[in-house]
Image (cartoon, helix red, strand yellow):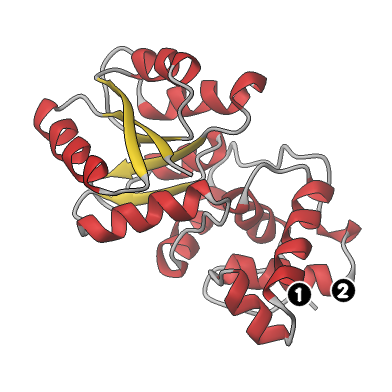
Amino acid sequence: MTIRVLLADDQNLVRAAFALLVASAPDMEVVGEAATGREAVHLARTSRADLVVMDVRMPDLDGIEATRLIAADEDLAGVKVLVLTTYDTDENIVDALRAGASAFLVKDTRPAELLDAIRTVTAGDALLSPGPTARLIERFLRSPSAHHTPGTGPDCLSDRERQVLTLVARGLNNTEIAETLGLSPLTAKTHVSRIMGKLEVRDRAQLVIVAYESGLVTPGTSGQRQ
C-alpha cells in the first residue's frame, strides 16, 4: 500500500525538502502541497490523502484550525494529521491535539524518524513520545477551556481495558503493551480498538488526553488511579 501524503507548510523550501524526503520512500507519494491552512483543507478533500503533515503557523488559516476542520469532516474520517512545530513545548500543540491531530513532531526531527512517524500514524498507531506528552497534557488540563468532548470516560472500561489505556498514555505501542501484559500483539491491538469505540475517540492521541483528563494517569506518574 502506498501512503498518500499531503504537505502543508508556508515555507517553500521546507515543503520542497519534505517533498523530496517523502518521494524518496518507496511506500509513499506526495499528492499535494499547501501553503496555507485553507489550501490544506481543500486539498485534503480533493487529493484523497491518507495523512497531512501540518505546520502550525500558516497564513489565511493556521494549522490548528485546519486540523479541526479536517477532523470534523465526516468525509475525511480516515485522514490523519501529523502536526509539526518548532519546539516540543509549543503551546499550540495542546490545541492541535484537542482539534484532532493524531501526533506531533518537532521540525528538527531526523528524516528517517519523520518517515517512520508517517507510517506509524497512517497505521493508526499514532502516539506522542512520553516526555512531551506528560508536559502537554498537564498544560491541557490546566487550561480554563479544558474539557473532554467524547461520549464517556474510562469508568465504562473493564479492568483490563483500563490497564491497556494506562499503558497507551504512558507511551507504549501495541507490541510493548502486549509484552507488558502477557498478551499477543493482536489481542493488544483489539483492546485498543475497543477502547476507542467505547470512549468515542478517533485515535490514540485522543486516548492519551482522556487518560490524563480523567485522572487515570497523572503527569509525572505512570500508575493507575486508585
Quadrant of the image occupied by residue 18: top left
Element assignment for label 1? helix
Q: Which residue is mark 1?
A: 163
Which residue: 54% across, 68% down? 219
Report crowding for label 1: few under 14, some 14 to 19, many 20 or more residues within 10 A (C-alpha): some
Q: Which residue is mark 2?
A: 159
Quadrant of the image containing the C terminus: bottom right
Relative to the observer, which residue lies in front, 184 or 71? Answer: 184
What amino acid is found at the position of numbered circle 2 in the picture? Asp
Element assignment for label 2? helix
Residue 84 at what x, y percent from top left? Answer: 31, 43
Q: Establish if 17 lies above or below 174.
A: above
The answer to whether 71 appears left or right of 13 in the picture is: right
- Which residue of the protein is positioned furthest toward the left in this rendering? 13
Relative to the observer, which residue lies in front, 188 or 1? Answer: 1
Which residue: 47% across, 55% down? 120
Residue 29 at what x, y percent from top left? Answer: 33, 36
Q: Which numbered disc covers residue 190?
A: none
Calculate the distance from the C-alpha at mark 1 to the C-alpha at mark 2.
Answer: 6 Å
| Residue 184 visible, this angle | yes
Asked if marks 1 and 2 touch (Cβ < 8 Å), the reply is yes
The answer to whether 121 appears left or right of 199 in the picture is: left
Relative to the observer, which residue lies in front, 57 or 137? Answer: 57
Q: Establish if 63 lies above or below 179.
A: above
Q: Establish if 55 lies above or below 35.
A: below
Quadrant of the image occupied by residue 150: top right
